[in-house]
Image: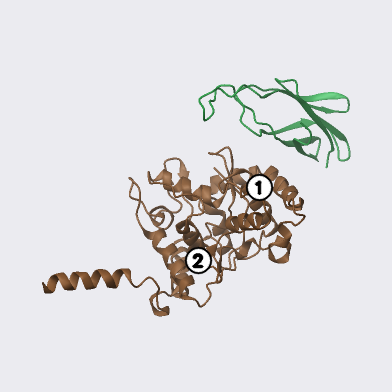
Chain colours: A brown, B green
Amino acid sequence: MLRKTFMAAAIVACTAAPLLAAGDVDPQADFKAFRKYFTERFPKVPLNDFVNGPYSMDEGLRKQWKAIDEFPPYEFAVEQGKQMFATPFKNGKSYADCFPNKGIGIRQMYPMFDTKTGKVVTLELAVNQCREANGEKPFDMAKDDMAAITAYMAFTSRGKPFDIKIPDDPRALAAYKKGEEYFYSRRGQLNFSCASCHVQNPGNHIRTEVLAPALGITAALPIYRSAWGGMGTTTRRFQTCNAQVRGEPLPAGDEDYSAVEYFLSYMSNGLPISGPGARP
Amino acid sequence: MAGTIRVRATASGDATEVQSLIRHPMDSGFVKDAKGELIPAHHIEVVQFEHGGKTVFTALWGPAVSKDPYLKFSFKGGKAGDELKVSWVDNKGASDSLVTKIQ
């Protein structure tokens, strides 16, 4: 009888406490520990080079990348994005009206936490919110038009350091924590977490690929990925990562994806945007 | 199909190095779409580079070349300021060309 009451009380307690007190989550401490781990493990890699993913880990791959970078495969997407950015919506407004600084050189601020809605807003979500607010249909978040426009926006931010803010709001801290938990949780038939590859094995091979370090990993997105033969957004990469561990990809715009991007980009604060990127 | 060619030609010494990126789907004709139907072959057949009235490089492409092909080669001769013409024709008869200056 006592046991039943105890169990019931425990269940109620678990479901009734979704918000976290400031003391439970310490992003700044996490940031320091995360950075220390990577810089100590890879002392020869200059801090800003982590944003180049596998190329910061493998000299041979870097040479190939430098050769490709003379004529980057994402060039067409950037041009298309630039044209799209300059084209007004049917109502006469344009993307410039939705974003600070007319949408130029602001990619490094995303994802950001919207205190009005209490949600994390990634760049892709912001683009679609802008479209819907102006009577346009939202883009498919994984490729094509969304990739082109975010490629252009990333290009205008190249070199600018990530500047992700976690406002003093328990909902923002909860989103950060959700992202952190997603990152470190195992999933899929292969039972890998994001950390299994990107914290435990950066620089090592998984089949024929060289794994990127988690530090700076969102800086190069969106990417032209040779394996796709085309461009893909952050959403597409996360969905592919899920499929690669034989897990269920989440639908585009899922809050877990926004949360993990928020966490990873915060961990990369200060590191320069290197996108749009080219990857094997 | 206009505006599909990007080219950069750099002269150094007595040779010119040329790099180009051409935007083209390069469908092999062997791939099926989501409905299970074959996507018809649509690929570049000939790429040509001309300098000083002479053809300095010809490529005969087919289904094995991937989408948005990148090409790099060197030829003897050419100096900064010379014109270099790039042109391609595909299996549907479409074509594009571009004239650039060697740097």
Vertical placement of residue A174 versus B19, above or below = below
Vertical placement of residue B2 versus A38, above or below: above
For the point 46% across and 75% down, which residue is it? A170
Quadrant containing the C terminus of chain A is top right
Disc number placed over residue A148 in the picture, else none: 1
x, y percentage for residue A276?
63, 51
Which quadrant: the N terminus of chain A?
Answer: bottom left
**Mark 1 Cα within 10 Å, few/some/many (few <14, many 20+)?**
many
Identify the subunit bearing mark 1: A
- The image shows a total of numbered marks equal to 2
Report x, y in % for residue A214: 47, 58
In depth, the one of B40 and A55 nearer the eye is: B40
Amino acid under label 1? Answer: Ala
Q: Chain of mark 2?
A: A
Q: Say whether disc 2 or disc 1 marks the residue closer to the N-terminus.
A: 1
Q: Is residue A257 left or right of residue A90?
A: left
Q: Which of the 4 image quadrants contains residue A207?
A: top left
Q: Is residue A153 above or below residue A244?
A: below
Mark seen at residue A267: 2
Task: Out of A215 and A95, give the one closest to the viewer.
Answer: A95
Evaluate whether label 2 is on the same chain as label 1. Answer: yes
Percent x, y for residue A128? 61, 54
Q: CA distance from mark 2 to mark 1?
A: 26 Å
Q: Position of residue B29 (x, y in %)?
A: 59, 21
Question: Label 1 near label 2: C-beta < 8 Å?
Answer: no
Label 2: which secondary element: helix
Which quadrant holds residue A165? bottom right
